[in-house]
Every structure is written in C-alpha cells, then in structure tokens.
C-alpha cells in the first residue's frame, strides 16, 4: 500500500487563497474554508469562520505562536506563546513586552522540550500585543542576545503577520470594528456578523449492544470481499488486521487495516448486517475539497482509522512525516445509513497534531 499517494484526500494540495470563490461559493450552505500563507505566517478559517493564525514552522514540530478566534459578536479569542516555564517577557525587535501574570496563564501540558504555552484570552491584551508587533520585524522568545545554537525557534519572523491578521478580520467581518485584531476602528461590536449557518448533522447517538460474534463477522466480511484487497508495496507481504464494531441493533462496522507502515496504515471499511456478512458494503467517506468547493469522496481508505463506540465517531489521521508533524485529521458520525463528516483539521506546515487548524466543523462536535 502506498501511504504517500494522495495523503490529503480532500483538502489536497490546492487551497483557496481568499479570492472571490472563497467569498461566493458555499458547501452545504457554509462559506468555503480558506488557508493561506503570508511569508512567515499561515491563516486558516473554517466553514464556521473560526480562524487560526500561526507562525510558519517549516523545519521543526513547533508552532511558537498560535492565535485562535471564533466568529460572531461573542467569539472566543486566545493567543499562545511557547516559552520556558519561568519566562514572563518576550521581545519585539529587542524591546521587552511583559506577560503579566494577571493576564497570561500557563498551559498545564509541556512540550517535549519542557516548554509551555503561556496564553491569554483577553482581547484587549491581544490587541495591545498586536499593535506592538505590527511594526516589528521579529519576535524573540528568549532574553537577548540569542546565541547561535538557540536561534532556531527562539526568534520568530513577524513578516506576513499583518496580512494574516487582516484576512482573519475580513473573514469575520471585523474590519474597522472595535473587536478587530489589526486595524481597530469605531464600529460597534454588535455589528459583527454572526457565525455562519448551514446544513447540520444532528445525530443522537445511543451506544448499541455489543457484538456477540465480532471476530467471526469480521472474518466473514473480509472473505466475502476478497476483490477489495490490500495491495502491499513491492517486496512486502500482504497482512491485515480485522476489527468489528456495533453501529446499531442491526448493523456493524468492519475495519480491515492493510499492511501498516512504520507509523501509519490504510484501512478498508464495510457496513454489514450483523447476521448477513455477505450483504456487507464498502464504506464511502466524504472529505473536504477546498479547491472544488465541495465535500468529495475519498480516493483511498482512511489512514490510521479508529472507531470509538463510546462516541460513535470514526476518525482517520494522516501524517506526512513523524519529525515535521504536518498532516490531516477527520471525524465522521454514523446517521443510520452512512458516515457524515463532522470535523476536519489540516496543516501543510510543521506542528504538533493537536494544533492543526480546523478546516471543517459541524456545530455540536469537537474540532480537536
């Protein structure tokens, strides 16, 4: 199985860059998501106009600066900086910018280097930081001077930040508004457009009775669908892992993982009657295609597929590389007949997977 072929099934390689198509086209009634790079920065806004800005980390698995903002009058906002645990100041072109304890909190989970995200959710503090940063060239995350072996990751270019902020404000209808991130105006916050609405996936999930014959059912489905075979890479032996999960009182999900590689593998999925494996049908999953302004059928089976019987959510995660950490994650909910896409995250730049920005979100479902 070629794991590097068409890794980003739906989001793919061509993302809209904030042009007219992004503004006019709709997917299920929602605005088409956008993801665009501005020099050292990337901005992503999903179908609910939740936007994330982060520095462009193309060599290391760290996003040192992450700004998130929800759409709407009362949309939540946060700014996070990856710092040493005892650091309470950063530097903009050498000028100190204090991170007062009253305004900035520390995330409870450190990264692999023992650093923590220090974050604030106060808009006025974030606006003050942005106004100080907009005319600066670089943000330094350690006390100057920076020695050569600390330069990577200690200094973040601010080139492109203003353009990224402007796109986020425009997307959320905050230009010249008091709630704007960049160009703060006199517009009343009540004038900010609401969160976009569209078709919803409203599923009340009730965990079904466990399967009494899961192993036998999975084996029977696999045997009945020998034509849908896992194709190993040249020189490798074919291998597969079979699992079965209850979907409802009458239906089950069978997962057949194909020849897993070093850190990921693709799967064939089937929905089958519990008592008739010969009637099983392959699962067709839709994923986001921004370039086509549509949800399209995935060309291959999901990667690192997982089904959680507690929540009824099917997920897949694709990693481009274990070192860099870019990739895609998606989740689907079963509506009784098919799996419906409820969330998708995508990053083509380096960063830990839990910080991949959201490109698609259905109200009521987690995006992380």
Image (spheres, helix red, strand yellow):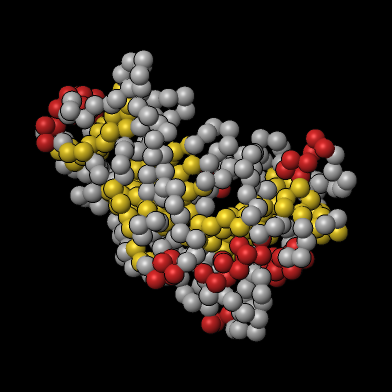
Residue 357, above or below 309: below
Work out whether residue 206 can be spotted.
Answer: no
> Closer to the camera, 355 or 252?
355
Residue at horizontal 23%, vertical 49%?
A: 338
Left or right: residue 291 versus residue 136 is: left
| Rendered location of residue 363, percent (x, y) | 40, 61
Left or right: residue 202 versus residue 217 is: right
Quarter of the figure with the N terminus: top left
Work out whether residue 281 can be spotted.
Answer: yes
> Closer to the camera, 200 or 170?
170
| Rendered location of residue 138, percent (x, y) | 77, 55
| Rendered location of residue 256, percent (x, y) | 28, 29
Residue at horizontal 37%, vertical 29%?
A: 2
Q: Residue furthest right?
A: 145
Residue 253, above or below 39: above
> Closer to the camera, 9 or 213?
9
- Tell me how many marks there are: 0
Left or right: residue 125 versus residue 75 is: right
Residue at horizontal 41%, vertical 63%?
A: 32
| Rendered location of residue 26, percent (x, y) | 36, 66
Left or right: residue 31 versus residue 208 is: right
| Quarter of the image where one finds residue 251 | top left
Residue at horizontal 71%, vertical 37%?
A: 114
């Amino acid at each position: 199985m070629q794991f590097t072929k068409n890794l980003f099934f739906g989001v793919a390689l061509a993302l809209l860059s904030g042009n007219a198509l992004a503004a006019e086209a709709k997917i299920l009634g929602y605005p088409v998501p956008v993801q665009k790079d501005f020099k050292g920065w990337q901005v992503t806004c999903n179908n609910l106009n939740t936007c994330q800005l982060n520095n462009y980390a193309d060599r290391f698995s760290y996003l040192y600066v992450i700004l998130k903002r929800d759409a709407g009058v009362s949309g939540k906002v946060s700014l996070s900086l990856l710092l040493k645990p005892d650091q309470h100041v950063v530097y903009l072109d050498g000028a100190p910018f204090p991170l007062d304890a009253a305004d900035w909190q520390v995330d409870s989970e450190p990264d692999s280097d023992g650093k923590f995200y220090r974050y604030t959710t106060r808009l006025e503090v974030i606006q003050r930081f942005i106004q100080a940063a907009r005319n600066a060239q670089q943000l330094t995350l350690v006390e100057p001077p920076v020695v050569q072996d600390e330069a990577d990751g200690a200094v973040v270019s601010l080139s492109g930040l203003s353009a990224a902020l402007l796109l986020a404000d425009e997307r959320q209808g905050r230009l010249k508004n008091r709630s704007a991130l960049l160009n703060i105006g006199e517009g009343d916050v009540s004038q900010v457009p609401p969160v976009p609405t569209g078709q919803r996936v409203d599923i009340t999930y009730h965990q079904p009775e466990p399967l009494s014959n899961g192993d036998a059912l999975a084996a029977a489905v696999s045997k009945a669908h020998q034509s849908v075979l896992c194709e190993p890479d040249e020189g490798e032996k074919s291998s597969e892992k079979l699992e079965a999960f209850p979907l409802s009182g009458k239906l089950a999900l069978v997962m057949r993982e194909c020849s897993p590689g070093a850190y990921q593998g693709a799967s064939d999925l089937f929905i089958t009657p519990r008592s008739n494996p010969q009637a099983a049908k392959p699962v067709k999953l839709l994923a986001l295609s921004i370039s086509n302004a549509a949800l399209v059928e995935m060309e291959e089976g999901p990667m690192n597929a997982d089904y959680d019987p507690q929540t009824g959510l099917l997920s897949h995660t694709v990693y481009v590389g274990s070192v860099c950490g870019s990739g895609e994650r998606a989740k689907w909910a079963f509506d009784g007949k098919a799996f419906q896409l409820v969330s998708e995250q995508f990053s083509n730049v380096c960063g830990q997977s839990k910080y991949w920005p959201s490109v698609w979100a259905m109200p009521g479902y987690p995006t992380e």
